[in-house]
Image (tube, helix red, strand yellow):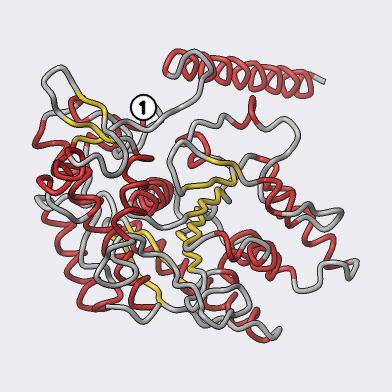
Amino acid sequence: MSSIKQTDNLNSVIRQHAEWLSGQLHAQRENLFPPNAQKSMRTFTSGEAATLLGVNDSYLRKLHLEGRGPSPALTPGNRRHYSAQDIHDLRVLLEKTARKPGDYLPGRRVSPEGSEHGYIDHLQVIGVMNFKGGSGKTTTSAHLAQRLALKGYRVLAIDLDPQASLTALHGVQPEFDLHDGGTLYDAIRYDSPVPIADVIRKTYIPNLDLIPGNLELMEFEHETPRALSQGKAGLFFFRVKEALMQVDGDYDVVVIDCPPQLGFLTMSALSAATGVLVTIHPEMLDVMSMSQFLRMTADLMDVIAESGADMSHDWMRYLLTRYEPADAPQNRIVAFLRTMYGDKVLNAPQLKSTAISDAGLTKQTLYEVERGAFTRSTYDRAVESLNAVNDEISELIQRTWGRT
């Protein structure tokens, strides 16, 4: 009898603590983003805008003086600041006079003859995965999606992790903002799925849309075995791919933050992916865990392939995350991985940085946080590392589409 009472008390305590924490997080969001608790993207200096566009700052100044393109905001010191929308509008303007198509809008090329979805290039679906928590999946997914959007791609970010960290980074708090569903589960469930367009949200960054996540995603893990036993699941691993086909023409790239487990959600995401990015923290325990992850993934892909699925992918890469160049043991592991996997390991590692973790304290990525919040060297080192990683992935996308 006493054990039952203790269990009841524990349930009560856990529920109470969850409600307290949720309330505090909601209050923090309201304080950070008043009055409507909505996030917005920071502005960019003229130098940052020029770098994003791949032009000289002097050329942006010339456009401004000639009254061409959007008018930037001017500081008291007469410095120009551009919003993310301004940068996108400048891309559209510059693309009209570009030497070749795609110089400023690097997304999919429109088919002159009209293919199934009207594009020469196929949709890139990038699954970011590893079943060990703390490997940097969400940090990687968020910065990759935002960087690609800022570079002119039309991007859909999908939070497939029930913990919903990618969702929180983009200003959506699952407990308060997703009362009646609103995750990918709604579009891939077995009974009465909704069109995927119904769960897509615009974000505060032009070209970046989001499908948020929450604990409801676990329903797919619970329902799939039951549906399989009843013969209702069909080819369950195609459900994410089939849902994405509904919006194929609306995006250039889809970035999926997969859950840290090899469950039915991850298998379905893997079947939809055209590119796979495996995050690796270069520590021995993480590498040992990755060995098991790769073995299990290969076994699952064999099972899926035997069911008739095409499990070929355009590319697969390993990304070194939270890398500390001064750490000798990490350097030995990195050398080992590069020797073993060669060019399957991205050249650029994602460096460990207090700037990234500090930005996360206010539910921001490094691309969102104000540069003045950190010392110049700390910020520059971190953002250069992220840009190198994300731009290398952008080059992979371009090569997949047959461009140099």
Q: If the image is split into quadrants, where does the C terminus sit?
A: bottom left
Q: Position of residue 50 (x, y in %)?
A: 19, 47
Q: How many marks do you count on the picture?
A: 1
**In the depicted structure, whether residue 150 falls above or below residue 362:** below
Q: Residue at x 68, y 63 (%)?
A: 246
Viewer-nearest residue: 223 or 370: 370
Q: Is residue 77 above or below residue 178?
A: above
Task: Report which residue position mark 1 lands on.
Answer: 361
Is 259 placed left or right of 362 in the picture?
right
Question: In this orientation, which residue lies closer to the viewer: 356 or 231?
Answer: 356
Q: Residue at x 52, y 83 (%)?
A: 312
Residue 352 picture location, percent across and down? 22, 45
- Residue drawn 51% across the image and 51% down it: 157
In the depicted structure, whether residue 179 falls above or below residue 163: above
Asked whether 140 or 41 is in front, the reply is 41
Residue 42 percent across, percent down from the top left: 32, 31
| Image side of residue 320 versus residue 138, left or right | left
Which residue type does callout 1 highlight? Answer: Leu
Determine the residue positioned at 32% across, 39% down: 70
Q: Quadrant of residue 239?
A: bottom right
Q: Is residue 387 left or right of residue 83?
A: left
Image spot of residue 298 (x, y percent): 52, 77
Extreme residue toward the right, this view: 230
Q: Quadrant of the N terminus?
A: top right
| SS at mark 1 in the image | helix
In terms of depth relative to the viewer, which is nearer, 366 or 134? 366
**Residue count near mark 1 (Cα–Cα under 10 Å), binned few <14, some 14–19, many ≥20:** few
From this view, report whether residue 205 is shown above or below residue 300.
above
